[in-house]
Image (cartoon, rainbow, N blue to C red):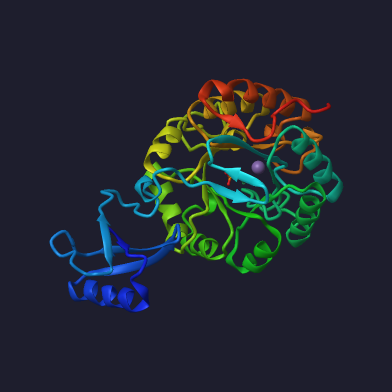
Amino acid sequence: MIVYVRGNAGENGIASLGDYINGLGGSFHRAYLFEKTFFVVSGIDMEQTCEHPAIEKIFRPGTPYQLAHRELNPEGTAVAVGGAVIGDGCVSVIAGPCSVENKQQLSEIAGFVKSAGAEVLRGGAYKLRTSPYTFQGLGEEGLKILKEVSEENNIPVVTEFTDTRDADLLFQYADIIQIGTRNSLNFPLLQLAGEMGKPVLLKRGQSSTVEEFLMASEHILSRGNSQVILCERGIRTFEDATRNTLDISAIPILKRATHLPVIADPSHAAGDSYLVPALALAAIAAGADGIMVEVHSAPQAALSDSGQALSFSQFSDMMENINKITGAFGKAAHAPLRGAER
Ligand code: PEP
Ligand code: MN
């Protein structure tokens, strides 16, 4: 249950409301979102007893997720960062390599994807790999390269936050903090990401239900950060023809359930580059606010996820096709999505 606190309640009114709820035998979590104070109340039903002067209104979501509920911001939350906007009704494209490998590699890819219409550059510096013997990422050096390339190309960057001990570094170098599928149930990491004051791109856990996915976002929102982008990246199913199964249904389900923007990552869902454009188009047709894809200047030589990286020409072709379909779904692209020089 969510209590909307009156804007003029003041700290005294808020404290008094807290005492009032505790006095009724309930507990509450205070969160400040959309320039408003909310109390997420548990343990009591305040239906009969909402007389306190600090209460503006009471909302019962009827779902375990509360602050993520669409009703909290019915027109939808847009995430704005470094000139990019995700969730404003347009289709946004986030693109880049799986891993930052070196400055030259990232510069080349950044220049290309930006010229073809990508709004955000992706690239992992800390890679959580299934095998401890494969490339684990450049770490801090990778973050520095990301920042340099971001500034040189005037494009914001998203990179994965894998360990609470790296919070200061991520804060310093990243524009958007990514929480990967493997950490989508790492609640201390989610909460810290919520406290960093930067937008968060949250991947769906590979075995999470839609509700568990939304509850993961709730850990970020409960820390007062409404700038969360949800990313459907495929789930584990019995099907082994693809790396994961892109859950297309989750996109309209999430769009209805929550105010947060929803994007899809067809690269990690597919695991094979030839499938990526088709899944990207399907996700946009299903209502996604954008896509995140892996692109590499020399896909076969990529140090991680080489099989799913789009070549420059595959990326250009996909962007042309995205451009063709966005209008048909009442959407637009921020920048013209076009095939750049190949
Ligand atoms: C990634 O986007 O770099 C990544 C590792 O994705 P996921 O967490 O979805 O596997
Ligand atoms: Mn990858």
> Is residue 5 placed above or below 319 in the rendered structure?
below
Snapshot quadrant of residue 115: top right
> Is residue 183 placed above or below 104 in the rendered structure?
below
Residue 231 falls left or right of residue 37: right
Residue in front for this viewpoint, 36 or 260: 36
Residue in front for this viewpoint, 336 or 172: 336
Q: Residue at x 41, y 55 (%)?
A: 218
Q: Residue at x 37, y 68 (%)?
A: 30
Residue 307, horizontal then vertical, whole percent: 70, 32
Snapshot quadrant of residue 168: bottom right
Residue 126, horizontal then vertical, whole percent: 68, 55
Q: Number of marks in the image?
A: 0
Residue 19 falls left or right of residue 264: left
Residue 83, horizontal then vertical, whole percent: 67, 47
Residue in front for this viewpoint, 195 or 145: 195
Residue at the farthest left position = 48
Residue at the farthest right position = 104
Residue 96, horizontal then vertical, whole percent: 72, 41
Q: Give the quadrant of ligand 1.
A: top right
Residue 65 falls left or right of residue 219: left
Q: Residue at x 50, y 43 (%)?
A: 261
**Quarter of the image that includes the C terminus:** top right
**Quarter of the image that includes the N terminus:** bottom left
